[in-house]
Amino acid sequence: MVSVASWNINSVRLRMPIVERFLKEHAPDVLCLQEIKTVEETFPFEAFNALGYTYHAVHGQKGYHGVATVSRIPMQEYSRHDWQANGEARHVGVELTGRGLGPGQDMVIENVYVPAGGDVADREVNPKFGQKLDFLGRMTDWAGSIERPTLIVGDFNIAPLESDVWSHKQLLKVVSHTPLEVETLARFQAAHNWTDIGREFIKAPDRYFSWWSYRSKDYRVGDRGRRLDHMWASPALANTASAHRIHEDCRGWEKPSDHIPLVTEFDL
């Protein structure tokens, strides 16, 4: 069994105390972090090593963006893609190694931080929205060439289903839930026949959120969440998924991220 967690941590150095708590309490084999907001030179390697996470793949950027994957089982960096086409650190891929896994039993884990896309859902007046759509387009082109069992995780910054948001009607024109974004993400899903692992275990229309804005002092009041974080598996790998959990309690920890961790277990 291999367990993989994904978490937009919104500054790994600032929130290392809650990362440590999560790893001590839940101990996933692999942890994929987004929005680490630090370069590799200042990434907290020692803190992860002390917890047994001695394998690292860090694609960082000072103050913004950045992704990192840490593991307590052997892995190595596999890929870096510039789907933003501007040098921003938004992706790192790893492959699990050293477990004696044969053909069809290995796993590549792609860790991605999709741009948020700004506030206006119109690429003509908001270039950031166009960059987000183009980012997803490059991801879609890449997905068609995948050959190995692959898990892609991260902050997709899109809540595709009506039950992925607190109010479908009120958010239809809000970036992250617009029909154009949902359609663009659906094309990415179709390009590799990805399985949305979260929704395999938490069936729609059941409520499933992974993000709550900092604007509310208590995220539970009104429960205005969205499912922006995802774990999608290629067909053969999806068949080995045995459990999926969300850790909503982490949103209430001291100095939390505005996102929560997702964890999927695979029986390889």
Image (tube, grey):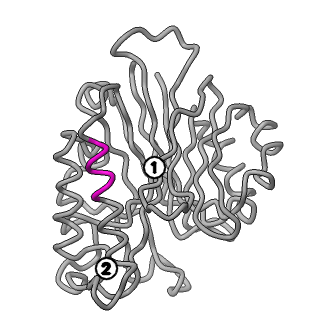
Dot 1, how many residues are within 10 Å of its Cα: few (below 14), some (14-19), or many (20+)?
many
Task: Mark 2 or mark 1: name the one nearer the start of the chain.
Answer: 2
Residue in view at x 54 percent, y 66 percent: 251
- Residue type for callout 1: Leu
* Residue 141 falls inside the magenta stretch: yes
- Where is residue 243? Give x, y as percent: 37, 35
Q: In this picture, which residue range is highlighted in magenta?
A: 137-143
Quadrant of the image occupied by residue 116: bottom left
Tally of numbered tags: 2
The image's mark for residue 175 is 2
Dot 2, how many residues are within 10 Å of its Cα: few (below 14), some (14-19), or many (20+)?
many
Asked if residue 263 is positioned above or below residue 165 in the image, the reply reads above
State yes or no: discs 2 and 1 in contact (Cβ < 8 Å).
no
- Where is residue 44? Give x, y as percent: 78, 50
| Label 2: element kind | loop
- Residue type for callout 2: Val
- Where is residue 133? Give x, y as percent: 29, 68
Q: In this view, which residue lies farthest toward the front?
A: 86
Residue in view at x 22 percent, y 39 percent: 192
Quadrant of the image occupied by residue 207: bottom left
| Label 1: element kind | strand
Q: Is residue 132 left or right of residue 199?
A: right
- Where is residue 239? Give x, y as percent: 25, 26
Q: Is residue 159 left or right of residue 261?
A: left
The image's mark for residue 262 is 1
Residue in view at x 80 percent, y 45 percent: 47
Residue in view at x 30 percent, y 33 percent: 146
Asked if residue 266 is positioned above or below residue 195 in the image, the reply reads above
- CA separation in Å, label 2 and label 1: 22 Å
